[in-house]
Each structure stands twice: as C-alpha cells, then as structure tokens.
C-alpha cells in the first residue's frame, strides 16, 4: 500500500514515465477531450458527475508528487480573473511561474508532443484548465529519496 495521497495507478504510471519538460494537462468539464489534446497522450477520466472531481482536487494530489517547473492557465481574455484561478494558484508553490494563455493558444499547447498525461475532471468552473510542466529533482533530493 502506498503512503502517498496519490493512489490512482494510471496517473502514477504516467507520472513515473514522464520526465523534465513533460506536460500534464488537468482539464475542466468543458474541455474538448475528443478533439484537442495530443492523441497519443494517455487520458484518465475522473469526470463522474458534474463537480466531481474538481481540477483543484486533482492538483492537490499531484503537486506534492512532482517537481513543477512552470504552470499555464487558460485565460478568459478579460481583466477579471476566472473564479477557478485563485484556488488553483493557492495550491502551487510560490516560486513556480504562472503564465496566462488565451483559449486558442492553450488548446494548441495541449497538442504538443510534450503532453505526457491528460486528466479529465468534471469541474464546472469556467477556464479551470491547467498545464503543469514537470521540472527536475535536484541531486541532493534524489539521493535522500533513495535512502
């Protein structure tokens, strides 16, 4: 049995196979999963009913499990940030840069060959999609993990 908060075997496998520069998409319930993300990227569907699970629920389990180099959020194109952005940002390490990308460019970014995993949620909040770029594990941290 694992001690981690993250227990989903498909997500663990994809994260284990990903490396520095790989991208994880955590999408809201409005995301066009059938037509937009990289077709070869594994998709984990966690969208059972509207509002179960939220992007922030998934993010809370993923953040402690991987080093995050950068984050991209889908921008709504207005001066007012989408409702979902504040709780998403609160789960991210303060040192991680966050970029806002308009919807069309965000969809294009999900077609990159770097996309290693797509996690579909049933989040009904608009513009709640997140792209996480995996960073590196520093050598000292990697050594302590093996001890």
Image (cartoon, rainbow, N blue to C red):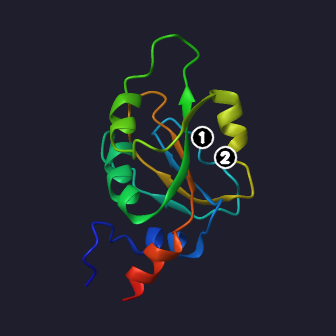
Within 10 Å of disc 1 (Cα), the crowding (few <14, some 14-19, many 20+) is: few
Residue annotated with mark 2: 110
Q: Which residue is at 59% across, 69% downward?
A: 18
Q: What label sits on residue 32 in the rendered view?
A: 1
Residue 34 as seen in the image, left or right of residue 64 = right
Q: Could you say which quadrant of the image residue 77 lies in?
A: top right
Residue 15 as seen in the image, left or right of residue 52 = right
Q: Nearer the viewer, mark 2 or mark 1?
A: 2
Quarter holding the C terminus? Answer: bottom left
Up the image or down, 51 lies above or below 100; here it is below
Q: Which residue is at 39% across, 81% downward?
A: 145
Q: Is residue 70 visible?
A: yes
Separation of disc 2 and disc 1 at Cα? 11 Å
**Is disc 2 placed on a helix, strand or loop?**
loop
Return the disc, 2 or 1, that comes first in the chain's sequence. 1
- Which percent across, then down, holds residue 85? 41, 30
Up the image or down, 30 lies above or below 145; here it is above
**Is disc 1 placed on a helix, strand or loop?**
loop
Quarter holding the N terminus? Answer: bottom left
Q: Which residue is at 57% across, 59% downward?
A: 135
Within 10 Å of disc 2 (Cα), the crowding (few <14, some 14-19, many 20+) is: many
- Which percent across, then down, holds residue 112? 74, 51
Residue 39 as seen in the image, left or right of residue 24 = right
Which residue is at the far front? 140
């Amino acid at each position: 049995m694992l001690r981690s908060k993250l227990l989903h075997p498909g997500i663990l496998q994809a994260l284990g196979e990903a490396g520095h520069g790989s991208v994880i998409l955590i999408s809201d319930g409005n995301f066009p999963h059938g037509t937009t993300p990289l077709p070869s990227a594994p998709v984990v569907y966690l969208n059972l009913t509207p509002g179960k699970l939220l992007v922030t629920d998934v993010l809370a389990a993923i953040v402690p499990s991987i080093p995050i180099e950068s984050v991209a959020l889908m921008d709504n194109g207005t001066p007012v940030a989408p409702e979902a952005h504040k709780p998403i940002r609160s789960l991210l390490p303060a040192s991680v840069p966050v970029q806002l990308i308009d919807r069309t460019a965000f969809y294009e970014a999900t077609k990159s060959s770097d996309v290693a995993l797509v996690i579909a949620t049933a989040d009904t909040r608009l513009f709640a999609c997140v792209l996480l770029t995996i960073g590196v594990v520093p050598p000292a941290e990697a050594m302590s993990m093996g001890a």
